[in-house]
């Protein structure tokens, strides 16, 4: 599917504390992504509506929670975003073996991610 929100990211000053909270409060499970300070969050039964996401070590004091939208082609999505009045704030980058990711601000200034699946991304 494309153009749907498929992933969220929660930045945290203390990822271990955040994971403990979400595990206790909601039963979420976590798995570290490689050696990165990033943990994938499995939020429930895959057969139920909803999405999974991640908790990451905060990179900036003002880093917001971000929802990422799955797109077929990240380059085309960037052009569409800019044409519609959005601004790219983190340019296209490879997530090796996963795909291509970029972040943008919508006209209200909210940050979102766009993600293109591509297992060949390097």
Image (cartoon, rainbow, N blue to C red):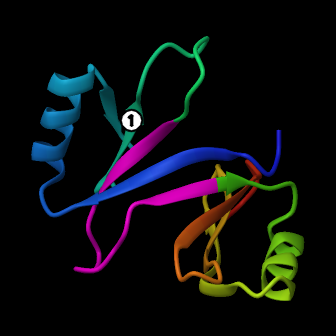
Q: Residue at x 18, y 51 (%)?
A: 15
Seen in the image, is 10 located left or right of residue 80?
left
The residue closer to the viewer here, 25 or 70, is 25
From this view, report whether residue 22 is shown above or below residue 37: above
From this view, report whether residue 108 is shown above or below residue 56: below
At mark 1, the secondary structure is: strand
Q: Residue at x 80, y 67 (%)?
A: 74
Q: Residue at x 53, y 73 (%)?
A: 111
> Residue 28: x and y, percent?
31, 25
Residue 121 figure quarter: bottom right
Q: How many marks?
A: 1
> Residue 77: x and y, percent?
83, 70
From this view, report whether residue 97 is shown above or below residue 44: below
Residue 72, visible in the rendered structure: yes
61 in magenta: yes
Residue picked out by circle 1:
41
> Residue 78: x and y, percent?
79, 78
From this view, report whether residue 22 is shown above or below residue 95: above
Seen in the image, is 14 located left or right of residue 109?
left
Q: Residue at x 61, y 11 (%)?
A: 47
> Residue 23: x and y, percent?
21, 26
Quadrant location, the N terminus: top right
Residue 100 figure quarter: bottom right
Q: Residue furthest front?
A: 108
Report the span colored magenta: 52-68
């Amino acid at each position: 599917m494309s153009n749907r929100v498929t992933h969220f990211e929660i930045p945290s000053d203390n990822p271990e504390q955040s994971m403990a909270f979400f595990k206790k409060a909601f039963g979420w499970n976590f798995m570290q992504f490689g050696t990165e300070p990033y943990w994938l969050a499995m939020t429930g039964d895959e057969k139920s509506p909803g999405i999974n996401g991640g908790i990451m070590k905060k990179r900036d004091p003002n880093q917001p929670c971000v929802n990422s939208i799955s797109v077929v082609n990240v380059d085309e999505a960037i052009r569409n975003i800019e044409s519609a009045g959005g601004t790219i704030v983190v340019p296209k980058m490879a997530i090796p073996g996963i795909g291509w990711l970029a972040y943008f601000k919508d006209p209200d200034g909210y940050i979102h991610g766009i993600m293109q699946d591509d297992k060949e991304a390097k």
